[in-house]
Amino acid sequence: HLKLDCPDQMPHNFVRKALDKEGNPLGYVEDGLHALVVGFGNTGQEAVRFLVEYGSFVGKDYLRAPMSIRVYDPQLQRKLGSFLQSAPALKGDPAFQWNADCAGSAGFWEAFERDADTNYIVIAIDDGSKNLQLGVSMLQAAARAGRDVSKMLILIRDWKDTRKSREIMAYYNAAYCPEGVQ
């Protein structure tokens, strides 16, 4: 869905591109993608594949731009082996941090607050309400920390899309995001 229908949510919109003195692009990325994937079921695994495919950018000197993808799931040990068998190039890649902590645990929040560069977040821990609750909490925490949320995207898996969930997202987008940012 992201690849086909949402060009404004592609990772290249959330990285810092190198510009010359006149503001023209230099063809590489200064600060790359720093993603957080919460939940490593089918949706989380597809999100990681998407981020690897569309979030690897050319940095200075033609090397890969700085990139980090942190994955949180308490059942990670059960799910990670088969995933890495289908994507062996990711095994041992220092850009990945695999965490078996629960979303919302003390370790999770410490890491989120410490990594102020996080700019692309995918939340897929259940079908809706828990995802929405965590997304709102993360948006509030980022706003309290003074982060630039105009360069941050929080994608929430919501299979039970309801009027109430849309109203909640609209309210928090309006309360915490600059005008025109959702």
Image (tube, grey):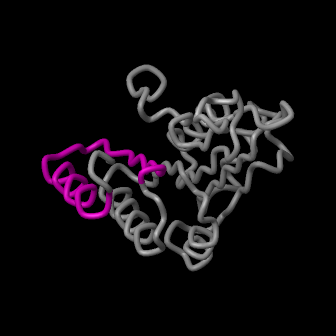
Q: Nearer the viewer, residue 25 or 66?
A: 25
Question: Is residue 155 located in the magenta-colored stretch of the structure?
Answer: yes
Quadrant of the rendering where the N terminus is positioned: top left
The residue lying at 40 percent from left, 28 percent from top is 6
Res 124 seen here? no
Residue sticking out furthest to the bottom: 106
The answer to which quarter of the image holds residue 98 is bottom right
Q: Nearer the viewer, residue 17 or 14?
A: 17
Seen in the image, is 128 located left or right of residue 97? Answer: left
The residue lying at 21 percent from left, 52 percent from top is 170
Q: Position of residue 77 (x, y in %)?
A: 71, 56
Q: Nearer the viewer, residue 10 or 99?
A: 10
Res 11 seen here? yes
Q: Position of residue 72 (x, y in %)?
A: 60, 59
Question: Is residue 169 located in the magenta-colored stretch of the structure?
Answer: yes
The magenta span reads 150-177
Seen in the image, is 167 located left or right of residue 28? Answer: left
The residue lying at 75 percent from left, 32 percent from top is 58
The residue lying at 42 percent from left, 46 percent from top is 155
Residue sticking out furthest to the front: 22
The answer to which quarter of the image holds residue 159 is top left
Residue sticking out furthest to the top: 4
Where 116 falls versus 122 (above or below)?
below
Seen in the image, is 126 located left or right of residue 85? Answer: left
